[in-house]
Amino acid sequence: MTLANKLKKVHGRKHGRPLNAARQRAMGNQFERYALTPTELTCDGTLDPRTFFPDATKLSFEVGFGNGDFLFEMIQRHPSEAFFAAEPYVNGMSALMKHIDDTSCEDGQYPLKVWMDDAMDVAKSLIDSSLDCIYVLNPDPWPKVRHHKRRMISQKNLDEFARILKDNGQLIMTTDVDDLAEWMATQATNHPAFECEANSKVDWQKKPEGWVTTRYEQKGKEAGRKQTYLIFRKKA
C-alpha cells in the first residue's frame, strides 16, 4: 500500500507560526526538487536509496531534523555523501529549504531527499542493509509517562533501524534531557542488534569526531543543560 492512501498520523501537529515571505519563497523554489513523493514510499522495504544516489560514498538518514542546521552543515561538509531526512513540521522544513535557497550548490542540487511527515514512513520503505548511519538528534522527550510510548526510540522502531542499517552501521542519538538519555540508552542496549561504542557513561559527554554543534545545542549549553551523545553500532 502506498502512502497516497495512508492516513495514520503519530507525530502531532505540523504547523507552528505562519511562514514569512522568505520561507514561503524557499518552499516554492526548492521543496519539490528535494521531496520524496507518497508513491515512492511504499512502506514495504523495496526502496533502494541508490536509485537516487548511485555514486554516494555514504548514505545517512536524519530522523526529525528540526530547523535543519545539522543536516545542512553536513551536506555542505560532505558533498560526496547523500542524506535522507524527515521532518513533519512545516516550519522546520521551510527553515531547511531557506538554507538551501540562500546558497548555491556546485552540482546544481544537493544529494538530499526529504519527507515532510512521519520518519518511519521512510525507514519502512528502504531496503535492508542500505544505510551507513542514522541520526536521531534531540527528539521530542515526551516527558509524561503516559506518552512514553510516543518516543522515537522504541524496540519496534529499533527493529526497523536495525533492518536498514548495514553491518557496523551507526545509530547516533543525542538529547539534553537526562531521563530521555537513559531511556534511549536502555532501549538500544536491550535490542539484540545493537552494541554501545562507549566504554562508560563518561563517554556519553564526548562529541563524536567532526560533530556539528547546532544553535539548539549551543543554547542548551548556555542554559546549563548537558548534552548526551549516544553512539550505537549494528552488530555484524
Image (cartoon, rainbow, N blue to C red):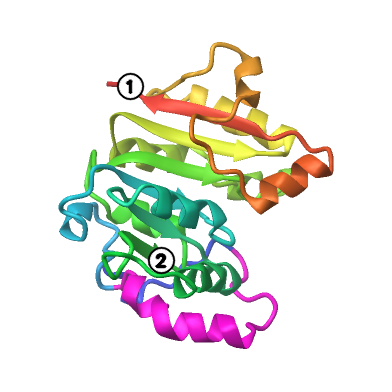
**In the rendered view, would you say 221 is above or below 208?**
below
| SS for dot 2 | strand
Front position in the image: 61 or 68: 68
**In the rendered view, would you say 137 is above or below 101?**
above
Quadrant of residue 115 in the image?
A: bottom left
Query: Distance between the Cα atoms at labels 2 and 1?
Result: 28 Å
Determine crowd level at label 1: few under 14, some 14-19, many 20+ residues with C-alpha closer than 10 A.
some
The answer to whether residue 141 is seen in the rendering is no
Q: Amino acid at mark 1?
A: Lys
Residue 177 at x, y = what percent? Answer: 73, 38
Residue 140 at x, y = what percent? Answer: 65, 51
Name the side, left or right, on which 179 lies relative to 173: right
| SS for dot 1 | loop
Q: Amino acid at mark 2?
A: Trp
Q: Residue at x 60, y 50 (%)?
A: 150
Residue 62 at x, y = what percent? Answer: 45, 50
Quadrant of residue 236 in the image?
A: top left
Q: Residue at x 36, y 47 (%)?
A: 78
Q: Residue at x 44, y 86 (%)?
A: 28
Find the magenta span and give its range: 12-38
Q: Which residue is mark 1?
A: 235
Name the side, left or right, on which 12 lies relative to 167: right
Q: Which residue is mark 2?
A: 115
Name the side, left or right, on which 120 lies relative to 90: left
Q: Determine whether label 2 and label 1 are within 8 Å by CB.
A: no
- Toward the top, the furthest residue is 199
Front position in the image: 90 or 210: 210
Quadrant of residue 104 in the image?
A: bottom left
